[in-house]
Amino acid sequence: MTASPLAPGWLTVPADLNELRPQGKPELFPASAARTDQGELSIGGVGVAALAAQFGTPLYVVDEADLRARARSFKSAYDAAFAPLCGGADVYYAGKVFLNTSVARWVSEEGLRLDTASGGELAVALAAGVEPANIGLHGNNKSDQEIERALSLGLGRIIADSLDEVDRLAAAAGRLGLTANVMLRLTPGVHASTHEFIATAHEDQKFGLSMVALPGAERSDAAEAVRRCLDAESVNLLGLHCHIGSQIFEAEGFGEAARRLITFLGQVRNEHGVQLPELDLGGGYGIAYTEQDRPSTPERLAAGLADVVSAACQSVGIDVPRISIEPGRAIAGPAGITLYGVGVQKDVQVSDDAGQGLRRYVAVDGGMSDNARPVLYDADYSAILASRSSGADAMLSRVVGKHCESGDIVVRDVYLPADLRRGDLLAVPATGAYCWSLGSNYNYLPRPAVVAVLDGQVKVMVRGETETDLLSRDTGVGA
Ligand SMILES: *Cc1c(COP(=O)(O)O)cnc(C)c1O
C-alpha cells in the first residue's frame, strides 16, 4: 500500500500491521510486550483480552519490570559516569508524571529518591513509606502549610522557586526551630524542546529565580536568593537546580544549562567564599511516542553530561558538586500502555493541500479524560490492534475519544487494519507518564484502573472509579 496523501511526512505505512517491533524503528512498547501464537498482545505475560474482561476499558497497564529497569538504568548510568567526579549521582523520580504508593515503592527499591510538587504528592510518598530524607518538594507557589509540613517532616530538600519563598522558608524554619534544606531553582536561559535548544539571557516564564539583574537592580534574584540563604541561620543552602524542558532528545541543552549554573557556582564562591555542594540538572529526557522519535540512552546522556560538568568545574576552579537529576517521563512513560475498546467508526473523504483521500475515524471508550496530552500539547501517539492480528490492508485512521469535544483525539494519524471492528481492543503505547496523572472526570467518565503486570501476575495499583465514586462528593444526592 502507498502512503495516504493525508498522512504526515514522518508516518510510514507499516510492512506488517501486527509487528510490535518493526526493524529500524524505535521501541514503543514495554519490554515484555509480545504477540501470542493466537495474535493477541500480552504484557508481563498477561493477555490483553483477559485484562479488559476483568477491569474493563479504558485500562492503564504498567509493565513493572520495565519501569523498574528504566529507573535502575538511570541510577546506574549516572552513578557510573559521575563516580570519578563526585562519588556518584542521585536520581529523583519526578512523581508528578505517574505516582501512587506502588510506583513510589518500586523506584525507592531501585535506589531512587522521589520528587513531589504538592502536599498531595507528598502525602502519597509518605503513605508509601518513602523516607522524608529522600523526598524533594518542588512547586512555584508552595502554601504555608506545604512549607511547614516539609520542614516538620525534615524533607531532604525543598526547592525554592522565588525570593518570596526563600524568605518564607527561612522564617518558617526559624519559627519552628528547624533547618530548611534548600535548593534554589534558577532559570539558566536555556529552553530545550525536542530537537533544539534556545539560549537567551532573560526568562519569560513562571518558574525559577532569574540569573539576570533587572534594570537598575544591584544583583539578580538568583544572586540575592543565595545571599539571603547564606545569611539565614535557619537555612542550609545545598545548591542549585534547573529544569530546562521536557521531551528533549539532544544533550546540548542540558550541557549548556550545566555550564551556566557552574559559572554561577563560581561566582558564588568568589563573592561568598563557599562552594555549594549540590547541583541538580532536572529531568526532561525524551521518549519515543511514535516512529519519528529517537530517544537517547541514560548511558550516553550521563557520559556527555559528565564531560561537560567536569570541564566546566575545572575552568571555573571549583570541586565537582554532587550531581542529581530528575527523570520522570523516561522512567514511567514507555512502561505503560492504555487499552481501549473500539466502538463507532466512520470514513470521511478529505481533501487538503497535500491531496485527497479517506480518513477513518475510530472512536474508543476513553479519550481526553484519560490522555489529555494530545489536547494540551498536540502530542502524537501511536496505536496497534491488540486483541488479535490482522492480515487486512492498512487504513489511515484517527483514533478519537467519546467526549463532547471535536479536539478529543487520542492518536491523530496511524495506520490501522482496514478490518477493525467494534469490540476489538486497541493498545496505545507510551502512556505511562502524564496520562493517568493528568486524568479528569470530564463528561463524568470514571477514571480507569491502573494495573501492574509482572510474570503472568496482575496487581491493581489503583482501582477504577465507579459511578458511586463520581457521585460521592455531591452533597445533593438523595436530598
Ligand atoms: C516535570 C519535572 C521533571 C520531570 O520531567 P520529565 O520531562 O518527565 O523528565 C523534573 N523536574 C522538574 C522540576 C519538573 O517540573
Image: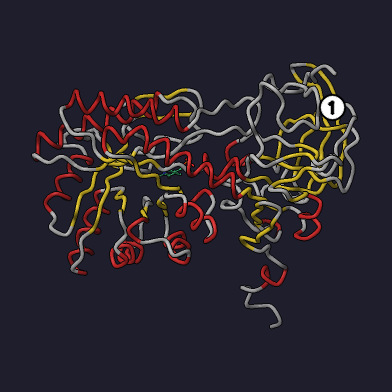
Give the residue displayed 71% in from the left and 82% down from the top. Answer: 478
Height in image: 421 above or below 95?
Answer: above
Give the amino acid at mark 1.
Ala
Closer to us: 104 or 434: 104
Give the residue displayed 65% in from the left and 52% down from the top. Answer: 454
User: Where does the C terminus fall, quadrant-wise?
Assistant: bottom right
Give the residue displayed 69% in from the left and 78% down from the top. Answer: 477
Closer to us: 51 or 236: 51
Query: x, y percentage for residue 157?
Result: 30, 53
Closer to us: 234 or 209: 234
Q: Secondary structure at mark 1?
A: strand
Side of 159 relative to 94 (left or right): left
Residue most extreme to the bottom: 479
Give the residue displayed 23% in from the left and 48% down from the top. Answer: 238
Residue 369 visible, this angle: no
Side of 98 relative to 324 (left or right): right
User: Where does the N terminus fall, quadrant-wise?
Assistant: top right
Query: x, y percentage for residue 131?
Result: 37, 61
Q: How is the image coloured?
A: secondary structure
Q: Quadrant of residue 79?
A: top left
Q: Quadrant of residue 363?
A: top right
* Crowd class of label 1 (few under 14; some 14 to 19; many from 20; radius 10 Å): many
Side of 459 relative to 233 (left or right): right
Query: x, y percentage for residue 77?
Result: 42, 35
* Disc 1: which residue: 394
Query: x, y percentage for residue 342?
Result: 83, 46
**Ligand 1 sits in quadrant:** top left
